[in-house]
Image (cartoon, helix red, strand yellow):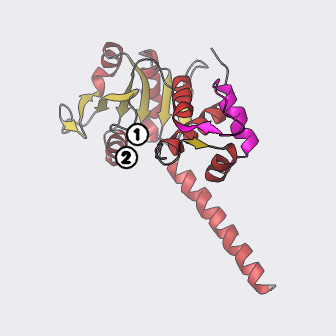
Amino acid sequence: MNSISPKTIERLILYRRILLGINPDEKSHIYSHELAKMTGFTAAQIRRDIMAVGYSGSPVHGYNTQAMINSISDFIDAPEVQNVALIGVGHLGRAVLNYFKGRRPKLSIVASFDNDESKVNRVIQGCRVIHTNELEKSIKEMNIQVAILTIPAESAQEIADRVISAGVKGILNYAPIKLHTPPDVYVENRDMIMAVEKAAYFARQKMSEESFYELHT
């Protein structure tokens, strides 16, 4: 199995997303410097990343967009569909279900879980809600490998422990807490409050820089 960093995987996923938005009838090939302008990465970085998936372009014509999409997909995606579970069907959970629907053919949210009796056994955003009491049993029966946590911080570690014990190896964590997990489990954290705070901080810096420039010009 190829060893590749999470950052490289992120870039490859971004390249694929951009390429999927290009009409191949209008643009069948793309150069690394063109992709660099669209992503903010260097052309050299892009060439290294694409070489890592075993694909190479032509110095004359650049990269064939469809062949590049196929190469990235073959590298990133599983041969078969990977099953995903969502735990926590609140406002954020529903938004995730709605956004995710039909976007990736090799990833499927096959079940959602909640402890709210008013939601259990309902179909929300096309996904049946199962009580969290049945979490471990359902994960094993459905061969779920990835879990998305959209739950409060106080219950996130307990739920993470439970899904890991049932066989989950990848967690997307929206709870504002650092999860303690075994080294063989990958955790991707998405703290939206932290992200907004970071954006707000740099917005203030940009405003200060702009004010400084105006005062000295």
Quadrant of the rendering where the N terminus is positioned: top right
Pointer 1 with pointer 2, Cβ within 8 A: yes
Q: Nearer the viewer, residue 126 or 183?
A: 126
Local packing at callout 2 (Cα closer than 10 Å; few below 14, some 14-19, many 20+) is: some
Q: Is residue 182 above or below residue 159?
A: above
Q: Tell me if residue 179 can be seen.
A: no
Q: Does residue 70 belong to the magenta stretch?
A: no
User: Residue 118: which quarter of the image?
Assistant: top left
Q: Tell me if residue 23 can be seen.
A: yes
Local packing at callout 1 (Cα closer than 10 Å; few below 14, some 14-19, many 20+) is: many
Q: Earlier in the sequence, mark 1 or mark 2?
A: 2
| Residue in view at x 65 percent, y 23 percent | 54
Secondary structure of the residue carrying tag 2 is helix
Secondary structure of the residue carrying tag 1 is loop
| Residue in view at x 57 percent, y 52 percent | 194
Q: Amino acid at mark 1?
A: Thr
Quadrant of the rendering where the C terminus is positioned: bottom right
**Image coords of residue 75 (percent x, y):** 56, 24
- Range covered by the magenta-colored residues: 41-65
Residue 150: numbered disc: 1
**Image coords of residue 122 (percent x, y):** 18, 35
Q: Amino acid at mark 2?
A: Leu
Residue 92: numbered disc: 2
Q: Nearer the viewer, residue 149 or 95?
A: 95
Q: Does residue 47 belong to the magenta stretch?
A: yes
**Image coords of residue 55 (percent x, y):** 64, 27
| Residue in view at x 39 percent, y 21 percent | 81
| Residue in view at x 44 percent, y 25 percent | 146
